[in-house]
Image (cartoon, rainbow, N blue to C red):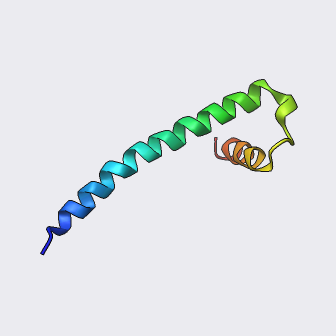
Amino acid sequence: MENPTSAARSFDLHTAPRADLKTRHSQALAKLMAEREDLRGINGFADMIDDSLRWTA
């Protein structure tokens, strides 16, 4: 039988980099949308993420 903690440990190793990547992408999108108002309305998903970041800040 496999050690149950090894599966949990491998999951944690993949979760942290994904969270960091998500944070970096969100920050970059917020910066881009702040600098380029003309991009508003081009991509609905980007608009939604930008709005959600503004509401949580």
30 relative position to 9: left or right:
right
Residue at the location (64% across, 46% down)?
Answer: 56
Furthest residue toward bottom:
1
Name the quarter where the N terminus is drawn: bottom left
Q: Residue at x 53, y 40 (%)?
A: 23
Image location (x, y in percent) of residue 42: 85, 41
Which residue, as the protein is rendered here, is positioned at the far front?
1
Task: Please state which of residues 57 and 2 is positioned toward the viewer in this rendering.
Answer: 2
**Image coordinates for residue 44, horizontal then vertical, percent:** 80, 49
43 is higher (above) or lower (below) than 30: below
- Name the spot of residue 27 as percent of width and height, x first: 60, 34
Residue at x 32% of width, y 57% of height: 11
Give the number of callouts: 0
Q: In which quarter of the view is residue 9 placed?
A: bottom left
Q: Residue at x 68, y 34 (%)?
A: 30
User: Taking 45 as reference, is 12 left or right?
Assistant: left
The quarter of the picture where residue 3 lies is: bottom left
| Residue 10 point in image, percent of width and height | 27, 55
